Amino acid sequence: MAGQTGQSRATRTHDRLVENAAAQFALRGYDGTSFARICEAAGVTMGALTFHFSSKAALAQAVCTTGIEATRAAVGDADQRGGTPLQSVGNVTQALAALLREQSVAQAAARLSREQPSLQMDWRGSWLPLVRTRLRQAEALKQLHPATQPESAALLVNSLVAGVEMGLLSEHGDALPPAPGRPVELWQTALRGIGAFQHEDLTHAR
Amino acid sequence: MAGQTGQSRATRTHDRLVENAAAQFALRGYDGTSFARICEAAGVTMGALTFHFSSKAALAQAVCTTGIEATRAAVGDADQRGGTPLQSVGNVTQALAALLREQSVAQAAARLSREQPSLQMDWRGSWLPLVRTRLRQAEALKQLHPATQPESAALLVNSLVAGVEMGLLSEHGDALPPAPGRPVELWQTALRGIGAFQHEDLTHAR
Amino acid sequence: MAGQTGQSRATRTHDRLVENAAAQFALRGYDGTSFARICEAAGVTMGALTFHFSSKAALAQAVCTTGIEATRAAVGDADQRGGTPLQSVGNVTQALAALLREQSVAQAAARLSREQPSLQMDWRGSWLPLVRTRLRQAEALKQLHPATQPESAALLVNSLVAGVEMGLLSEHGDALPPAPGRPVELWQTALRGIGAFQHEDLTHAR
Amino acid sequence: MAGQTGQSRATRTHDRLVENAAAQFALRGYDGTSFARICEAAGVTMGALTFHFSSKAALAQAVCTTGIEATRAAVGDADQRGGTPLQSVGNVTQALAALLREQSVAQAAARLSREQPSLQMDWRGSWLPLVRTRLRQAEALKQLHPATQPESAALLVNSLVAGVEMGLLSEHGDALPPAPGRPVELWQTALRGIGAFQHEDLTHAR
DNA sequence: ACGATCGGGACGCCCCGTTCTT
DNA sequence: AAGAACGGGGCGTCCCGATCGT
C-alpha cells in the first residue's frame, strides 16, 4: 500500500523507534529508559514518538511483540533442522543463546516481560512449550536418563537461558567472559546429565 | 533508656532501614524504589534515613554489603559440611538457592550488584571463587567427567543460580512453579553431566 | 456527488465541527477542551479540523460568532412580539434564559467571550444594548419606579442572565433545581421592583 | 508551638502559597493556572509547593476551604448586625458582594467550586442556607410580598451574587462599570420586588 | 480543493533524591 | 533526627505545521 520503492516514511520511523527502544530497554531496563534518550538515539523527536506510541507501555509492548515474534521464528527454524527430539532441544537452546546475544529486541523482550508483568507479555512462552514437548517426546522414546523428569530438564534449559540473560546484563568486564565455544561446551555438559547415553556431538552449532 | 546490652536506638533504626530497603530493592529494583516507600515500610522519617545514609547509592551499598556478608557466611558453612569437592559444590549451590529464596537481603545484593554496576558491588564474587576452587580440585582428583572443563562446570553452576534469581524476579504466578524438591532434582541432573560417575545421592539438602 | 442543492461536504463538516466544538466549549471551557475530543465527538479527523480552522482561537471565534448571531436573532424575535417596553424586556430576558438552556452554541458564546477576552468577542453586546434602550424608553414613558435608574435595571437583568449561566455551569445535581416555572416567577418578582405598578402578568412565557 | 515571634517559616510559606494560588485561580481558572506561575508569583520553588500540597487538586481544595471559611465568617458577621430578617438578607448580600470584590480567596472558592465539581467543594453552601432561613422567617412574619415564594427570592439573591461573580470575571474594561453605589441601589431595586412594603433604606452599606 | 497522515516542540503536573535549617 | 525547601527531569498532552494522497 505504501510506495513501491520501499517502506513509507511512517513505517521507517516506526521501526527505527522500536529498534532503538529495544536497545535501550535491554541495556537499562524499563524504568531506566527515558523517552528523551530513545529519541536521541533514534534521531526522531518526541512528537514523532508519541504519535506512533501513545504511552511508554505501548512502546514496550510493541518491542516485546516483535521480540517474541523474532524468537518464535528463530526457535521454529532451529527446531525444524531435524534430528532426534533431544538434538532439537540442543539446537533450540543454542539458537536462543545466539539470539539473545545478537538481537537486542529479543533481549529486550526477555527483560521487559520479566520485570514488567503489567505488560502482560510472556517471552518464555514463545519457546518453553516447544522445549517441553520435545522433552516429553524424548522421554517416550527412552532417550532421557531414567532418573530425569522431562520437567526437570525443562527447568535446566530454562536455567541455561537465564544464565545467558544474566551474562548479558552484567557485562562489566571482568568475570565470566563469554568465550566463543563456551556455550556449546556448556550445553554438552548439561546434556550429558539429561540424556540416556554419552553423546559426543549432539549439536550442530552454526 | 534501652538497655546498654542491646542495640542502641540508632543501630536498631539502621538495621530496620537496611532490612526494609533490601525488601524493596529486591522487589522493585533500584530505580523502582523510592526513599518515600522505604521510609513508609520501615516506619521512620526521611530525615532519619538521610542521617544514616548520605545518598541512595550509600544505602544500596550498605544493603549489598550485608547481603554479600550473609552469603559469604552461608556459603562457608555449606562448604565446611565436608565431603568430596563435588559434594561441596552441590551443597553450596543448594545453600545459595535457599538463601535467595528466603533472605531478601541476599536477593537484593544479587539484583543490585547486577543492575547497578556503578555501585561497584560484586555479589557473585562472594561464592564463585570458592566454587571454581572446588571444581579444580575435583578435576585434579579425576572426579570430573573427562570432557568437562572446570570453567564450564562453573558456568553451569552460575546458570543454575541465575535460574533461581530469574524465578524470583518473575513470580507472576503461572509458569514454572518452584515445586519443593525440584531444585534438588535439578541439581542432580546437572551434576550427572559434570561428574565422572553416577552418584545417586550427592547432596544433603536441608 | 452530493446533491448541489444540499450543503457541500466541506460545509457539512464545517458545521458539525462548530456544533460539537460548541458543546465541548460550553461544557469544559476553552482550556479544558482539546482538539482530540472535539474530533472524536464530531467524527472527523484532526486533519479536517486544522484544514477548516487554522487555530484553536479561530475555531472558538467561529463558535462565538454563530452563537452571537443566534442570540441576536432570538432576541430580535422576542423584542418584536410587541407590548410595552417593559414587557419587551421581560420577553427578551425569558428568551435569553431559554436560549442558554437549549442551544449549546449560545452557551459557548457566553462562556468563551467571558473567559477568553483575547478572542475579542462580546456576547452580551448582542442583547444588552437593546435592553438598555427599552429601559430608557420605559423611563421616558414613566413606567419605571421613580427610584429606579434604567442602568440599575439593566444591571439587574444582567444578573438574572448571569444566574442562568451559573446554573448551567454548576449542574452537579443537588442545589437550586431549575424547576419549570421558576424563571418566570423569578422575573415577575424582580420586575415588581423595577416597574411603577403591580403588574400581575407581564410576561408571555412560551 | 511555633516560634513566639510569629508564624513559623512553614506556615508563612503555606499561606503565601494559598494566597497567590487563590489570586491565580480567581483570575485564570483551574486549568488556566500552572504551578510554575503560582510559584513565580509567590516567590517559592516548585519543590516547596509540592512539599506542602501533594497535588494541584489538594492546593485547590486548600484554597477553597480557606475561602469558604472566610465567607462563612463575613456572612455570619453581617447577619448578626441585626434588624429584620429581610434587612439581614440585604446585609448578607452586600457583604458577599464586597467579599468577592476584595478577597481573592473568596472569589477563587466561588469559581473553583463551580467549575471543578470533582473537588467536592461547595462555596454557595456557606451562605445560601442562611439566606433561605432568613427568607422563610420573613415570610412567616408577613414581610414578604404575597406573590413571592421564599425560594424564588433565594434564587434572586443567588442571581445577584452570580452577577457580581460574572462582573469580576469579565473585566475587560468597557461594559458595566461597577460604579460605586450601584450595588446598593441594585439591591434596593430587587428588594422592592421581594418585600411587602416600600422601604427606602433597608441596608446599612458600609 | 479537500483531507488525512505524520511529525515537531513546548509545557504541565508530578515525583524524586538531596541539602539546609532547627 | 525531623521538617522544610530545592531543582531536575519524566511522562504525557497539546496545538500545530509540513507532507503527502485523492
Image (cartoon, coloured by chain):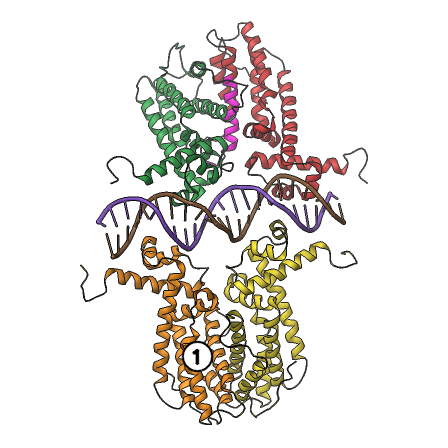
Chain colours: A green, B red, C orange, D yellow, E brown, F purple
Q: Is residue C206 visible?
A: no
Q: Amino acid at mark 1?
A: Leu
Q: Which quadrant of the figure has residue A151?
A: top left
Residue that numbered label 1 is attached to? C128
Residue B164, magenta (yes or no):
yes
Q: Position of C109 compared to B104: left or right?
A: left
Residue D136, magenta (yes or no):
no
Q: Position of residue A197 (x, y in %)?
A: 40, 11
Please report the residue visible at 46 percent of the width from the left and 64 percent of the height from the top: C118
Please report the residue visible at 45 percent of the width from the left and 42 percent of the height from the top: A56
- Residue sitting nearer the eye, B76 or A123: A123
**Position above or below: C158 against A159:** below
Q: Position of B30 compared to A192: left or right?
A: right
Secondary element at tag 1: helix
Mark 1 is surrounded, within 10 Å at the Cα level, by few (under 14), some (14 to 19) or many (20 or more) other residues, namely some
The magenta segment:
B155-176
Q: Is residue B104 visible?
A: yes
Please report the residue visible at 27 percent of the width from the left and 63 percent of the height from the top: C11
- Residue sitting nearer the eye, A146 or D106: D106
Q: Quadrant of the C terminus of chain D?
A: bottom right
- Residue sitting nearer the eye, D181 or B35: D181
Q: Position of C142 compared to D109: left or right?
A: left
Q: Position of residue C138 (x, y in %)?
A: 44, 90
Q: Position of C38 compared to C6: left or right?
A: right
Q: Position of residue D205 (x, y in %)?
A: 64, 82
**Position above or below: A121 against C102:** above
Q: Chain of mark 1?
A: C
